[in-house]
Amino acid sequence: MERLKHLENWLQAQVAEVPSQFPDQRFFISPASADASFRRYFRVSTGKGSLVAMDAPPQHEDCEPFCHVAKLFAEAGVNVPAVLAQNLADGFLLLSDLGNTTYLQALNEAIKNDPAGAAEKAGHLYGDALAALLKIQLTSVPGVLPEYDEALLLSELDLFPEWYLGKYLQVVPTSKQKAELDRVFSLIVQNNVAQPKVFVHRDYHSRNLMVIDPNPGILDFQDAVYGPVTYDLVSLFKDAYICWDEERILDWVIRYWEQARKLGMPLARDFADFYRDFEWMGVQRHIKVLAIFARLNYRDGKSAYLGNLPLVEEYLRKACERYRELKPLLTLLDEWQAAKPSDSNVGYTF
């Protein structure tokens, strides 16, 4: 409550600092959303409409990367929140409001109310998302964002033994299993770092894309990096929160590959090679997401993420089944599944 009062006082000061946003000098705030970090968002209703206030406690979060990436992406010509006022020391930002309809909400509503038209709606929304992604990627240059390099990719994979295996499955790999897991991790990352590099949003999925004009509105980009070209495609199409059949995903990835090549991006000439990179990048992300969702539950008390594990597990398994080099990972997963305590409450696993 103390921090909320501090935010209200700062917003009150903005009435004088940015009077154009507060024409009647009044505002009302209400919770908008929270994410998987320590950040919270509040909708600020004014006489002119609405704004969004970000509360990012500085001991846990840094607002500066958000401001930096917002500027980069805006210059790329995509729709991101404008930073109207900032207090980096206290972790407060005042942002333009991109609405409250996420891709996930719009797509789930279409699937529920108009199953026949849902595919067409998805095609339009994902077409817009790909067009925006290409704009971001085409402006990419090295040295502007942190490198999504081998060390960072491996550090994400290294969360898996502690949080997914240890906390969620309640198993401890043997020394032989750990050596084999490390070997597979090395193969995955070797593929990832060999891919062409672009700006990577890092969570380009249905909860962070808003239905708005111009579409989409793009949120939660503060962790953006410079790394593998397929990463955001995986986030978009192998989404932990909504599932599409593989035939449709394949069609969308082909469309991206064709458009990107026409625009001069240095992608593999053979689509099969590009799709292999997409799948291997997916394996890295799926392993990381399994670990992070488990950590959100066991460390942060956010149990809802456990409900998303089965879909991510399915993505991982299907990708590993298609590549000989990744099949040892399936063997390990099966061994750990067999070894988990019979009374452990882990829900769906492999």
Image (cartoon, grey):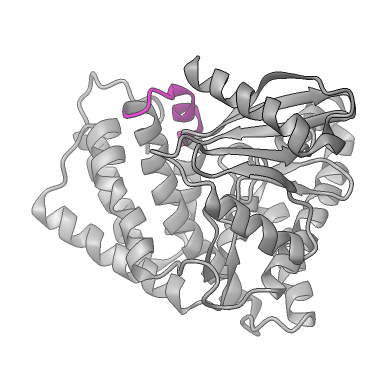
Q: Residue at 53%, 45% (x, y): give it.
A: 88
Which quadrant of the rendered structure holds the C terminus?
top left
Task: Please give the name of the residue rendered at 20% of the width and 26% of the height, measured from the top-left corner.
Answer: 341
> What span is in magenta?
299-309
Q: Residue at x 71, y 35 (%)?
A: 104
* Rendering quarter of residue 96: top right
In the rendered image, residue 4, in percent from the top left (x then y), is placed at 55, 20
Residue 7, picture quadrant: top right
How would you classify the magenta stretch by its main secondary structure? Answer: helix
Residue 102 at least partly seen: no
- Is 87 positioned to the left or the right of 182 in the image? right
Looking at the picture, tell me which residue is in the foreground, 78 or 336.
78
Count of marks overlaid on the render: 0
Nearer the observer, 192 or 71: 71
Q: Position of residue 222 (x, y in %)?
A: 56, 51
On screen, residue 45 versus residue 294, left or right, reads right
- Seen from the viewer's position, the closer of residues 194 and 244 is 194
Q: Is residue 308 magenta?
A: yes
Residue drawn at x 56%, y 65% is 278
Indicate the position of residue 65 as horizontal and vertical percent values. 54, 54
